[in-house]
Image (spheres, rainbow, N blue to C red):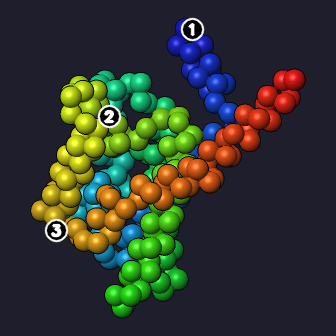
Amino acid sequence: MNVQHNFSAYFKGISFRRYLLMLAGNLLIGVGISIFKLSGLGNDPFSGMTMALSDFLHIPYAHFWLLLNIVLFAIEFFAGRSFVGIGTIINACLLGYVSSFFYEVWLQMGLLPVEFWQQLVIVCIGVLVSSMGVSFYQTSNIGISPYDSLSLIINRRLPRVPYFWCRMSTDVLCAAICYAAGGIVSLGTLISAFGLAPLIHLSNKLVAVPLLAQKQTGAAEAAE
């Protein structure tokens, strides 16, 4: 009964706008992953590793994403339970299928690039879409993805190690596994690892945070 009450209180404590922001964020991240893949210039380290391993093991990407995230979720649940939320479940279960769906859509539309400049344009679009998605997902603050939680868990267990290096260690490991499994580690990988932060910050400031602020202002006015 107490568990049921806790779940009920948790979901009631989340505004509808935060749910929408989280869902939109994960949708955009999935679209962004598909766009990076379309470019042929590499993806973010974790997605790139997942793609490379799924190809190496002959398991569909979306299925392998889910299987791998189940393992990572177990680690998050036992070692960093405070990071778990509804956004964690959505990210772990659906992102692989979203990105696979949109990648097939782009192929059906004949958008596969044939020139390097086209690849660069597609990467730039992927950067914009992904940064907006990460901004929404982070600002909603209702659950951290299993992979993102790893660096936070490491940082919590090793507080003397700056978070930057904790994150770098997981990203470098993923990139190394991606490369070893025959995946693409290229310009898109570098941009995903180092170039998204300024755009995420800008999106937070101009879009995501104001959206939630409007909700809070409206709620305060209604209370008055």
The amino acid pointed to by label 3 is Gly
- Say left or right for 182 vs 209: left
In the picture, which quadrant includes the N terminus? top right
Q: Residue at x 62, y 54 (%)?
A: 206
Whole-angstrom CA distance, mark 2 to mark 3, is: 28 Å
Whether 57 is drawn above or below 35: the answer is: above
Are circles 2 and 1 on residues that touch, CB within 8 Å? no
Check disc 1 and report its element: helix, strand or loop.
loop
Q: Classify 10 Å Cα crowding around label 1: few (below 14), some (14-19), many (20 and above).
A: few
Which residue is most to the left?
A: 180
Whole-angstrom CA distance, mark 2 to mark 1, is: 31 Å
Residue for badge 1? 1
The mark lying in front, picked from 3 and 1, is: 3
Relative image position of residue 103 (x, y in whole percent)? 45, 70
Residue 120 visible in rendering: yes
Give the camera-side residue of 143 and 223: 223
Q: Residue at x 68, y 33 (%)?
A: 15
The mark found on residue 182 in the picture is 3
- Nearer the N terminus, badge 3 or badge 1? 1
Give the camera-side residue of 32 and 151: 151
- Nearer the N terminus, badge 2 or badge 3? 2
The mark lying in front, picked from 2 and 1, is: 2
The amino acid pointed to by label 1 is Met
Check disc 2 and report its element: helix, strand or loop.
helix
Relative image position of residue 58 (x, y in whole percent)? 23, 63
Residue for badge 2? 152
In the picture, which quadrant includes the C terminus? top right
Q: Residue at x 22, y 43 (%)?
A: 165
Whole-angstrom CA distance, mark 3 to mark 1, is: 50 Å
